[in-house]
Image (spheres, rainbow, N blue to C red):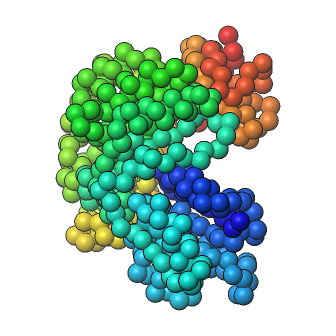
Amino acid sequence: MKKIFLETYGCQMNEYDSELVRSILKKENYEFVTDEFKADIVMLNTCAIREHAHRKVYGRVHNIRHARGKDSPVMIGILGCMATNLRQELFEDKSLKIDFIAGPDSYKRLPHLIHEASDEGQKSYDVTLSEFETYSDVYPSRTEGGVNAWIAVMRGCNNFCTFCVVPYTRGRERSRSPENVVDEVRRLAAEGFKQVTLLGQNVNSYHYDNYDFAYLMDEVSKVEGIERIRFTSPHPKDYPDHFLDLMAANPKICKHIHLPLQAGNNRILDMMNRGYTHEEFLSLVDKIRTKIPDVALSTDIIVGFPTETNDEFEDTIRVVTKAQFDIAFTFKYSERQGTVASKKYPDEISEAIKTERIMHLHATQKEITYQKNLAHIGKTLTVLLEPYPEAKNKDQMPGRTDGNALVILPLGPYKGGDMVKVRIIAATPHALKGLPV
Ligand code: 5AD
Ligand code: SF4
């Protein structure tokens, strides 16, 4: 029985894909090990979104070859988004010695690719992107005893934001049928999972025949045993009124909306091909808050997009101040091979200016987050406790509110997966402190 060590980089979709890969290969009698030195095959499930992804994979492959020694027969396979992007380069670079490559839509071919590479000594690859593959017939091999299970309901993206590599590495949008998703959620509930997070590169543009994302969320919420439903990652264009009304009315759907702003200036938003102005974005924020008053909002923001001036960056600060997000994930623009931005706009803003802008943005958001956290003091909130062994500090229990804020509880007669009512007694910019009531 061959042993595999699988390492995953990047987003939740990649974590989920690794669960699919584990399931596919376990069926073929491969064993997964946690010690890379015991593995016959090392696979890296790579990401092309994060910064320096390129360099990281190269460094890691060299590091594995070096650690195992030059005569070691260990095979190395590259999976995920970098596979699609760098196929040519990865194979041509002889010093890397990569045995096989599989793109995000080719995991069912992995047994074949591994066989070709090991028994026939060929370099084998498949990075074809599919318009249909949703892996709806593969049940992921998840870590047991979890509280939250991820479940991909759609894959790919049709939006082509000019900075983003996803449409190239993961291809066009396609969705699983609602029945298929609900079947999987029922199985997850039976296994003891309390929360499901529906996943997709553009999750709220889910559609299957005439069924949309609101329909899917409503169906999933009817599954007994599942207490909470979350979703990520969405686009602001896909929040129709009936979906917001469902969110407001359905107690199982967490009152948390991720709303990636990316930039606050209309010229930059247009260059990014985001499809909205900052006025439209802010009126969506108002509408969401009117319909779902206690909603938590999070966002993604890029600073230093090509040609962004200081004044235009200040527009981002203005929108952030007006929108009052609970949390913001911030990124310095970095060019991605193959994107429209990489072809049309040179990455001309200096690193120093990007750093200055991201620090300014951080400071602005940190204060907003802190004020939001302070405003929770005195409230009674329901917290879903996370699996205990994952906690870093052994005398505390971490949990999440409906709005996804982290709450720290003292140890008590409760365990991961329990829903506990707590009174918030203190706040920092990063977390809340609570006592059970
Ligand atoms: N440069 C910087 N940030 C990026 N993101 C995506 N592509 C890039 C890029 N080329 C950010 C966006 C997206 C998040 C997942 O990553 O903000 O929403
Ligand atoms: Fe990338 Fe835009 Fe699609 Fe999100 S919506 S995956 S940022 S192209």
User: Which residue shows up at 21% across the image and 57% down it?
Assistant: 271
Residue 333 shows in this picture:
no
Q: Is residue 373 above or below residue 107?
A: above
Whole-percent x, y for residue 108 in the image: 47, 60
Q: Is residue 105 above or below residue 389?
A: below
User: Which residue shows up at 59% across the image and 80% down it?
Assistant: 119
Residue 290 shows in this picture:
yes
Q: Quadrant of residue 233?
A: top left
In this rendered view, identify the residue nearer to me: 20 or 166.
20
Q: Quadrant of the C terminus?
A: top right
Whole-percent x, y for residue 9 in the image: 55, 59
Q: Quadrant of residue 391?
A: top right
The residue positioned farthest toward the right in the image shown: 395
Q: In the image, 288: left or right of 75?
A: left
Whole-percent x, y for residue 394 in the image: 79, 35
In this rendered view, identify the residue nearer to me: 415 or 128.
128
User: Which residue shows up at 49% across the image and 48% down it?
Assistant: 138
In this rendered view, identify the residue nearer to me: 369 or 275.
275
Whole-percent x, y for residue 142 in the image: 60, 44
Q: Quadrant of residue 412?
A: top right
Q: In the image, 128: left or right of 241?
A: right
